[in-house]
Amino acid sequence: MTHKCTLIFGLAAALVAAAAAESSASHFRGAAMVPSVSSSGLLTVRTTSFWRKGQAIFDEINPSVAGGSGQLSEVSSIDSSDARFDVLTTTHTYQLPGAGTYQISASGCCRVASGGRANWSESNWTMNSAIVWNGSSAANPIAFNFGSVQPEVSRLSSYSQNLNATSPDGLALSYNQNLNQNINFQPTPSFLVNTSTGLMTIPSSETPLITDNTTLGGQNVGADAAFSGNIVAANGSFVEFDWMFDGVDAQGVNNAPDVADGALANIVGTVFNFTFTASDPDGDPVTFDPGLFAILGPVPAIAPVFNNLTGLLTWDSAGSALGTYIFQVRGRDPGNLTDIGSLTVTLRRPQQGVVPEPASLLVHGGLLACGLLGAVWHRRKA
């Protein structure tokens, strides 16, 4: 356990680790549990977890909440569209009795067989998170979509990937790379998570150390090195993350595409335009899935419109709250390897007498066209 939280309402409750459905072989590849609370105390825990192909089970994740009532509802779905792993998304709800700091825990059996870098044990796993609630107001301290993190690490270059977390409540976020249960060390000595930005990096001198996991006749493809850490909100809420890096060569195998990220900033009422671009190290065509993959941050007053044929996302920010929004889309190659692209939009307070103008950032041949207050574009990987 990487964090310890104390209930502040004086209710003693033992943590009960809910065992996952039994399986004849190890298959867990990582997860993150993201909590939020309504003003009436309804706690929602949304979990993204990763599994060996064909091994995701709907009731595999069963979080327990110290001090909360029993589970009220559960909704699960499985995304098998990526050729490397299955993604299980579960949503559980619980009723909280009052203000407090609530610890959330889930555990089960077992991690995928260790191979490659072999920095983890094939054993039981435990995931943790916590949320602070004042007893009266809705709380959404951390928004995080773990499915957007690209695990692929090229052995011929450096690795650079942002966790892309935000706080709808406007809290400052910090990051660490604490080891989760049965992860013995981080993938390489120079694997770093920036404590302020959440940017994860591995230098090119050490990416070759992430070698292929060949256990179970190759069934654990892509489970080459485990990594973990925590996203921590300023009020003490936190989300633990735990997943596997996929070490790949630049030739001889199909490599995942790269969808470029971007950032825009302007005043409320601006119409934002951004064209997502994608490339593939193998030269394969990349197509975008229809619709947005996820929206992180506050709920926008007007939903963005995404044209998956052109990559153009348009968002009218009129009526939306100040803050940071992250809009995500997914691209895939013909071999069904995927990458998530993120557009981060920051809404600022209007200046008196200033009329909002459209903001756009178009990426074409290295030329950037920026809106009123500018924009920043960067690639997901170095």
Image: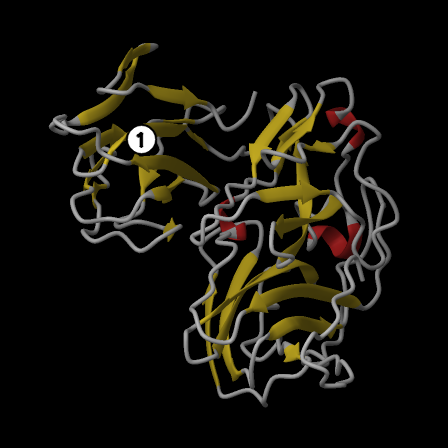
Q: Residue at x 49, y 23 (%)?
A: 281
Q: Residue at x 58, y 89 (%)?
A: 69
Q: Quadrant of the N terminus?
A: bottom right
236 lies above or below 88: above
Q: Quadrant of the C terminus?
A: top right
202 lies above or below 62: above
Sort mark 1 into few (<14), some (14-19) or many (20+) by Cα contacts within 10 Å.
many
Image label count: 1
> Closest to the observer: 193 or 332?
193
> Closest to the observer: 180 or 339?
180
The location of residue 196, given as percent across then percent down, is 62, 34
Query: Could you tell me if residue 305 is visible in this image?
Result: yes
Relative horizontal placement of residue 77, taking residue 96 as reference (left or right): left
Q: Residue at x 69, y 73 (%)?
A: 106
Q: Residue at x 51, y 76 (%)?
A: 135
The location of residue 360, given as percent across then percent down, is 22, 24
The location of residue 30, given as percent across then percent down, is 67, 57
> Closest to the observer: 274 or 348?
348
Instruction: Specify the amino acid type for callout 1.
Output: Phe
The location of residue 124, given as percent across then percent down, is 81, 68
Query: Could you tell me if residue 26 is visible in this image?
Result: no
Q: How is the image coloured?
A: secondary structure
Secondary structure beneath dot 1 equals: loop
Relative horizontal placement of residue 231, taking residue 182 as reference (left or right): left
310 lies above or below 366: below
Residue hosting label 1: 276
> Closest to the observer: 345 or 155?
345
Q: Quadrant of residue 195?
A: top right
